[in-house]
Image (cartoon, rainbow, N blue to C red):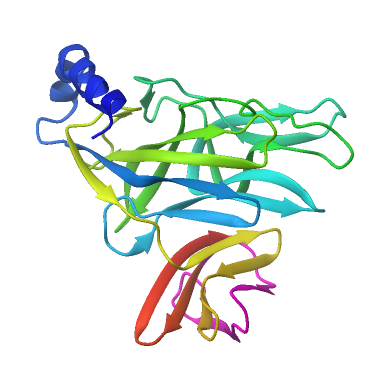
């Protein structure tokens, strides 16, 4: 266990336990620590499976848009607002949260964001956005399991040049609707990186680490919309329909499932 995490659990126990008890006596703040930390470079994504059910709940990516790096978070809801850049373009972005900030119903939520930017480098410009150069801060997000809403957060560090980001750990409250204090926990487990990554960008689905596999696209009604053969380890294909989709990548008897927004 990292010393910074050890310190956070002590602070959390003494300062915030009464709030959580009042919220839900049975809630457990579960945190997944990455060993080693996951460094995400341009074109890669880290898939977050909060509750260990092998279904990806959210994704953090460094995407390439016009050859420029863009930090992207994909989730059913993210704590954030609209950010105006120096060239007057406006993008949705994730708030920079500090340790101890509660992720809950009372926050300002951006819902159903397919690509919510938090650090970006516009064409011909310098790196901008509230996340550039931030160290060990938190993105607050929500995900759903069985129609129930859960709150969680992700600890990340963004390089000053916006060419990479590092994910250290992430966590969630395991009782639906219970506020999740960023950076704190009552249980911890180690997680390793997933070998297959799936995320959306614009109208495209991008799949890495799955050469020779088959990708299937489903709508919320469970109907298969399309099927694609992946001929490289960095494959992509377009999907015409908008909204929430389920992507299943099948290879050698193993299926990786990811929810994406288009």
Q: Residue at x 54, y 86 (%)?
A: 212
Residue 127 x %, y %: 75, 32
Q: Residue at x 55, y 48 (%)?
A: 40
Q: Residue at x 20, y 40 (%)?
A: 188
Mark yes or no: residue 262 visible.
Answer: no
Q: Is residue 29 left or right of residue 115?
A: left
Start and end of the magenta stretch? 219-245
Please tell me whether residue 231 belongs to the stretch shown in magenta: yes
Q: Residue at x 58, y 74 (%)?
A: 233
Mark yes or no: residue 205 visible.
Answer: yes
Nearest to the observer: residue 14 or residue 39: 39
Q: Is residue 22 left or right of residue 78?
A: left
Quadrant housing residue 187: top left
Please tell me whether residue 248 belongs to the stretch shown in magenta: no
Residue 163 x %, y %: 67, 42
Q: Is residue 3 above or below residue 176?
A: above
The C terminus, quarter of image = bottom right
The N terminus, quarter of image = top left
Residue 161 x %, y %: 70, 33
Q: Is residue 60 above or below residue 216?
A: above
Nearest to the observer: residue 171 or residue 216: 171
């Amino acid at each position: 266990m990292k010393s910074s995490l050890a310190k956070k659990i002590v602070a959390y126990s003494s300062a915030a336990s009464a709030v959580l008890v009042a919220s839900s006596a049975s809630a457990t703040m579960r945190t997944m620590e990455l060993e080693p930390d996951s460094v995400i470079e341009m074109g890669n994504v880290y898939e977050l499976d909060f509750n260990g059910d092998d279904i990806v709940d959210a994704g953090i990516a460094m995407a390439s848009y016009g050859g420029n790096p863009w930090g992207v978070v994909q989730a059913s809801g993210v704590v954030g607002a609209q950010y105006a850049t120096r060239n007057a373009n406006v993008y949705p972005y994730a708030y920079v949260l500090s340790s101890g900030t509660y992720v809950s119903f009372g926050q300002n939520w951006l819902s159903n964001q397919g690509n919510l930017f938090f650090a970006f480098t516009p064409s011909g410009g310098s790196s901008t956005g509230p996340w550039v150069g931030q160290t060990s801060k938190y993105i607050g997000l929500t995900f759903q399991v069985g129609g129930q809403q859960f709150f969680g957060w992700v600890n990340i560090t963004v390089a000053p040049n916006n060419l990479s980001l590092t994910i250290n750990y992430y966590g969630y409250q395991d009782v639906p609707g219970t506020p999740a204090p960023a950076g704190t926990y009552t249980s911890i487990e180690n997680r390793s990186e997933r070998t297959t990554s799936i995320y959306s960008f614009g109208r495209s689905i991008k799949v890495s680490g799955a050469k020779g596999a088959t990708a299937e696209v489903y709508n919320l009604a469970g109907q298969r919309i399309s099927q694609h053969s992946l001929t490289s380890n960095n494959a992509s294909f377009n999907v015409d329909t908008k909204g929430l989709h389920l992507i299943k990548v099948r290879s050698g008897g193993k299926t990786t499932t990811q929810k994406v927004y288009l």
